[in-house]
Every structure is written in structure tokens, then in C-alpha cells.
Amino acid sequence: MFKMIGNLPLNKIKLLILLLVLCGCRSFDFFKKEQFLILKKQKNYKELSNNDYENHLKKVAEDFVSSGLVEFLTLSRKSKDYFNNLYKNIIRNNELFLKKKMVPKIFIIDENSPVYFSLPGGYFFFSSGLIKRYVKSEELLIPILVREIVRVHKLVYKKQFMIPSGHVTIDKVIKITRLPIGLIHELNKWSLITIRRSGYDQSSLLSWLQIQNKNMIDFSRLYRRSWTITREEYLLKSFTIKEGLSFNKTLFMDKNSSNKFYAFLKEVRE
């Protein structure tokens, strides 16, 4: 005997409710799709573009600088001019490749960990720990700076949104500026060509990767996985061999560094 509700058995009532729920869910999904299609047809609707994401990251940079969570060293006018001249020389020799018009904004983070990154709008960040412990010559500063300049101009960032809130930490910025190994390799290839066209020693980039690889623990903060550094060096070596590029064995001699570089280095160390 089935229990009865009105003139219908209870099991049929349950089946009817289940069918109504399933139809309701499908109808809701269909409505969402239809609503999305209607939005796309509206004249004022547009999908997020590279410019939208570039502006998003600029806001992240602004919040990072003004958050009060990070301390920055105050650079002298002489050091700022030094960086501006390096930037102008790199752009001048790569005008067809680096086309964005921007004024570089250099920030030295008062941080022992060797970190560096950049954000759209010409924001370049280097930690004091990086400069003091690893940037021993101008030829080592060049590949770091060039790599970040290429990133900013070519928007080499993995799209991932973070809502700017005014509380942006170093680790948050590092997280959104990390790249998969494929993009890292492309960035390194572009940087290698840019360094060469700017009149600097192209072997400086590979030397910088080797330094990071030898000090993997110190630089692990910049990478999601430690093996990425080793893979990065291997891929660049393979590329240089394939292209038949030669290397200068006297890369780190003091004569390769300008007096302005040593003045900047002294300022950061003090």
C-alpha cells in the first residue's frame, strides 16, 4: 500500500518534486547564459582587455607604494638620474621594440631578502638586500633592470586579479608577478636581445641566472618551485648555444662599472 497525498501516491509526489528541481536548475543555467549573451549584445558591454589589466596592475603598484606596509630607502637625485639614464639608453637602442611612453619610478625596498619585480606604469622595485649582497657590478644590474623593463613594456604578466585594498604586501606582489616557465624563457630571450642592442655584455643575463641558481634558497621567494631557477638557466644556455652566441669571460671586472654605479651602491649600503 502506498501512502496517499490527495489523489497521488507519495512516491509519485517525490518524483514530481525531483523533476521540478532539475528543470529549475537547468532553466537557471540557461537564464544565466541568455543573460550573458544579452549583455554581450549591449553597446556599452566589452570584455576585459590588456589595457584593463594594465590599469589594474598600476593600481596595485600605487597601493603597494602608499600602503605603509613597506619601507623604502630615499634615493638621492644623483642615484635617480643614474637609473633614468640607464633606462633612456636601453629604450633609445630598442625603440622599435619598447614603445610605451612612461617615466620610470625606481624604488629600493628596505628588505634583507633579495627580491625584485616591476609593475605596469614604470614601477621598478629592488630590495636593499639584493643590491648589497648580489649586485657587485654594473654588469649585474643591467640584466635585472632590462628584464623588468621588457616586462613592463610588453606586459609580460599572467592574468590573475587581486582587488586593490591599500594593504598590498611584498608577497602579494611577488605572487601576481610570478610567471610560468614558458613565459620566463620568452622573457629571457627578449631580454638577451635587448641587452645586446643596448651595447651591454649579453652574457650578463646568463651570469645573473647562474648566481640565482647557486643561491637558490635565497631566491626561492621569487619562484613558486625551486627547480624553476635551474630550468630557466638550462633553457637560456640551450638558446644561446643554438644561436651561436659568444660570452665575455671578463664580465665582472671593476672597469666595467661606472663611478655613478659605485655612488649608488654606497648610498644603498649606508
Image (tube, helix red, strand yellow):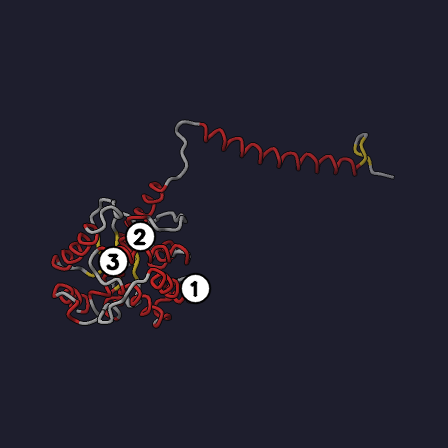
- In this picture, residue 16 sits left or right of residue 4: left
Q: What residue type is labelled 2?
A: Arg
The tally of labels here is 3
Q: Which residue is drawn at 38% across and 47% down?
A: 163
Q: Is mark 1 on a helix, strand or loop?
A: loop
Label ID, residue 151: 2
Q: How far apart are marks 1 and 2 (CA)?
A: 21 Å
Pointer 1 residue: 225
Callout in the foreground (3, 2) = 3
Disc 1 or 2, which lies upstream in sequence?
2
Query: Is residue 21 shown above or below 157?
Result: above
Residue placed under numbered mark 3 in the picture: 195
Residue type at numbered disc 1: Arg
Of label 3 and label 2, which has the lower sequence position?
2
Per the image, label 2 sits on a secondary structure element best described as helix
Residue at left offset 12%, top offset 66%: 259
Task: Return the x and y of residue 224 as percentages of the image width and height.
Answer: 42, 61
Q: How far apart are marks 3 and 2 (CA)?
A: 14 Å
Amino acid identity at mark 3: Ile
Residue 265, horizontal then vertical, whole percent: 18, 67
Asked whether the residues under the numbered discs 1 and 3 touch, taking CB atoms below 8 Å apart as contact, a structural biologist would say: no
First in residue order: circle 1 vs circle 3: 3
Q: Where is residue 76 in the image (x, y as percent from the top left)?
A: 13, 59
